[in-house]
Amino acid sequence: MTRSESVAAVQRLRRSRATRAKTALKKAPFSAWFGIVVILGYVFVAVFAHWIAPYGETQVFSEAFAPWSQEFKLGTDQLGRDMLTRLIYGARNTIAIAVATTLLSFAVGVSLGLLAALYRGWLDQILSRAVDVLMSIPSLIFALVLLTIFGSSITSLIVIIALLDSTRVFRLSRAVGLNVAVMEYVEVARLRGEGPKWIIAKEILPNVMPPLVAEFGLRFCFVFLTVAALSFLGVGIQPPTADWGSMVRENATLITYGDVTPLLPAGAIALLTVSVNFVVDWFLQATSGLRDEK
Amino acid sequence: MNPVARTVLQRLGLGLVTLFIVSIIIFSAIAMLPGDFAKATLGQSATPETVAAFQREIGIDRPPVERYFVWVAQMLHGDFGSSFASRTGYRRTVAEIIAPRLYNTMFLAAVTALIAVPLALGLGILAALYRNGWFDRLVNVATLTTISFPEFFVAYMLAYLVISRDTFIGSDFAQTLPHWLTVSLNWALNAVPKFPTLSNVNDQTPFWEHLWKVALPAITLTLVIVAHMMRMTRAAIINMLASPYIDMARLKGMSPMVIVLRHALPNAWAPIVTVVAFNLAYLIVGVVVVEVVFVYPGIGQLMVDAVKSRDVPVVQACALIFAATYILLNLLADIISIATNPRLLHPR
Amino acid sequence: MKSSGPGPREKGKDLLQIRNLHVEGFSDERWHPIVHGVDLTLKRGQVLGLIGESGAGKSTIGLAAMGYAKPGCRITQGSVLFDGIDLLAVSEKGRRRLRGSRIAYVAQSAAASFNPAHRLLEQTVETAVAHGLAGREEANRSAVDLYRRLQLPEPETIGFRYPHQVSGGQLQRAMTAMAMACRPDLIIFDEPTTALDVTTQVEVLASIRNIVEEFSTAAIYVTHDLAVVAQMADRIMVLRHGRTVEEADTRQMLASPSQEYTKTLWAVRKLAKPEVPADDYLLTIDNVTAAYAGKVKVLQDVSIKVPRGRTVAVVGESGSGKSTLARVVTGLLPPISGSISFAGQLLPTSLKTRPKEVLRRIQMIYQMPDNALNPRQTVEEVIARPLEFYLGLKGARRDRRIGELMHMVEMSEDFLERLPGELSGGQKQRVCIARALAADPELIICDEITSALDQIVQEEILKLLIRLQRELGMSYIFITHDIATVRAIADEIVVMHRGKVVEQGLKSEVLTPPHAAYTERLLSSVPEMNPDWLTRLLASRKI
């Protein structure tokens, strides 16, 4: 086969994958479409927060707890900051932190998990036992303990949650990695004398992508909810940075007067996680047909 | 030795080891505190003498191994140390702070578990039996939605619903709706029981009143837990129903009822128990948030306050209690799984 | 317990009539036909063998005879008349009443099909008691009687054991007892001995045949093994791609098959390479003992010599240590003691300490080509890697070599851009062979490489391997449990049993008597295409 032919072949393969993805999208249920549209909307708002928001993130106005009006579409918060603006900046802050945390957690979890699956032996034993112990403390509790020690800066928040969450990523990638590592094509590569880099990158990783991609969605939701919960409890993202969890807590008193405004940031969190879950659910069914969640 | 007994003992041993390591980790919390911690806790006005006294109090001047064993020994005698909130002449022990709150948390968790576990198992089994039917699909979307909600969202939604009972008719929103809709919505809202939105209890609160006051937190937790537990139960049962021996039972002409009760259930204990334990453990975490929302004086709320004020001994004690409960629940699930495994019960 | 059938039981009346059966299976988001319009008639007391390669639809038809479709399958058309009742038209409850009591089923994997939570006896009598055909006591007594007739050891007490406490061959017989419990009119045997070793298979076949004859039960016997079906069936129906190829009485079918496809099936067994004695040895295994992680020794004091340019067939049943031998040679499992020398030099025991050049000279091919090919790599990527890795070939030279290799394994270059999922089983195995050849090896270890393939494909692969050896002169270690394969390809044979070498030598020496006792048992247990084989074997063993 000549070079141009092989290029054409690769393109054909890619195209067939693209068309397959397209037909899968066409068949996607309403819930998945809904999820995709909502996620794109959130991303848009997060990226362009600066241009969309009517006021500055920490701009304070004279009236606290102002009702909904022409000037303040969703009223103002306990310090007199515009709720809509805070909500928009909250999208940027909360989502960015959750994405960063999930990425870090995956970088650590997947690489260690696949290494453990490939080499078994003492490396696997040590890592697995360590993860067992870490997972025997509920992660929110563990996060609380660590935050007591290190304080609630954004860096420590990301590192602590990513570390705790990577235990679950480790477990999953080790499990799916083990399923692939016992395959004979991996043995073939070892017998050939390939190093771990080749085996993980070329033999194992391409075959564990679907479950890992799905898990990325689920872990993102979990991380997102954890960050929100911590902020809600007042030990997560610290003022004056706008974030949805603390917005709920700071304005919670309004609920007692029958005002829905504090529920909006909570609803924003719920809507995003629901959407991600819908997409992941569909993705799991589309890629493996029968796989049910564990 | 009987293999069941042997495996159970192994698990118990493993559980103890885990608890030991966890206690070391939690203990290290103090050792890892930054140097200026005393100053930060005592405030800028602290004299060098008070700082030194405080450091002696938390024992930073002694070697960590010695401190660890003293700490464990004291805990085994029920002495969790003193809160940093103690002042000279007014010692507040961690134990006396925690005891009543621990009871409250356990009360809430027990009420939730009693509602949630049977409900989730029942729904999960139904969804598995009628999988891919309309019931299953409905439940799938509903549970997928609930597990995506932050606990505080569910909690405030419920609270809002109860409050709207009184405020809805007078709100601007109600005025904009057609009259008949306003009336019927108001009628529906009035059907909502007037649950208390603040769960303020104390040790004098009588049992039934206590129960009434935890209604909203318990419902919130139930909604969250049931969704998780139901989905996992469904998956476990479907997995079970795919085994060849279930096919065989069908080909033997057994009725669906017999298949589920006699052929699936005896093998389903292990997965189901694991699911329940996992979710009860999850319940503990949910408790923290829900207690804060409803201002329920439980151990979760206490822990959050202690984290904010960096009251390390209280945080340690709370974390240890949570971790121990968590380990215990998983251990229990393991033991039940082992005790119902025919391969272990009837060795070759 | 009495027979529950209302009709007369004498042979000759039609018991089961399947007409124009269509079954579809669901995969890739749509329904595909699996069985297209099969007709089948079974008389009382008759045994019909359904035979065909994978994908022929034989198990699906067997289940349809019970009015059952596997999850993910559906019966779309046709009728299944059992003793005058249309199983497809009657209610689910009506079908349930017949299943177990009048039509019973014996599955391939007894270990998975028995419920692990209940004792064998409970499961044996379950149907009889549930259908109200017998009281508990009576059913228990009858079950013990069946255990005895099926020659299960300790028939009085074996029923109180749990499935995991009983061996595979015994479980398969217990499952036959379970099927017999209600004295059904019809039993579907779905590959009941496929998962068993040959020596165990003989015993189970004999038990099944006796009891079916004794109660003159009609049976449908589904298998892919011609020699087995020749022993068990009165008539044989050959299936292919969900259609009937032909149907005839067993003897007639064996003597003179009429269809071209059937003839090719029959012809397969005749391949036999003439042996060539060796003069020069490539690999020498000396007194090797090996074990997995300190457990029982899987290989004990094994010594084998592999001649250059020849094939050594290593034969044995499961647990004989033959696959472990392959792991020791490749360095995946360093032995506890003993040594291996390759081309006159001592071979480092562990894979990690072997230089690349040594790794290149020993290649391996596996049983399941599905697992041996990375599903995400194209054929080209698979074959190119050893060329780049060992020989440093790049660009046009590499592409030319890939073309040559594809030519060697008789595949078109059009396949190069395909993923393994888009190839057939035989094609996948050819790609695996090409990958091994790419390294330019001197020794190829073939671990059961034809066992997962259909007979006709098996033969093609064996012929290919023989030709390649003639042209390129490498040695094979050919690990297999199948004697026909050994006859086809071996120059020398090593017989292994429980981790020890029982006998070794030239093919002609090992295959002609006198044999070692175990070799004798192994060879005599291999079913032959003669319908009288089992009868004669049992007669000779009783003496």
Image (tube, coloured by chain):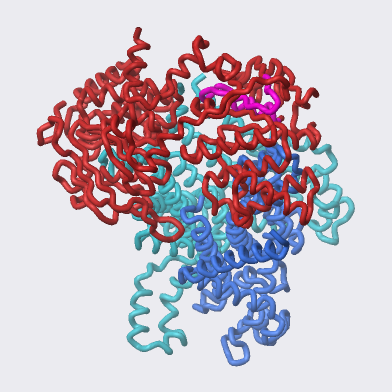
Chain colours: A blue, B cyan, C red
**Residue at x 88% of width, y 50% of height:** B49
Start-end of magenta stretch = C305-330
Residue A293 % position (x, y): 50, 53
Residue B196 % position (x, y): 45, 65
**Residue at x 21% of width, y 38% of height:** C42
Question: Which one is in front, C249 or C260?
Answer: C260
- Quarter of the picture containing the C terminus of chain B is top left
Question: Which one is in front, C293 or A34?
Answer: C293
Q: Is residue C405 visible?
A: yes
Question: Which one is in front, C388 or B152?
Answer: C388
Q: Quadrant of residue A194?
A: top right
Q: Is residue C311 magenta?
A: yes
Name above or below for residue A237 compared with residue C474. Answer: below
Q: Is residue B115 magenta?
A: no
B326 sits left or right of C146 in the view: right
C349 sits left or right of C373 in the view: right
Residue A49 % position (x, y): 69, 80
Name above or below for residue A262 compared with residue B155. Answer: below
**Residue at x 27% of width, y 51% of height:** C21
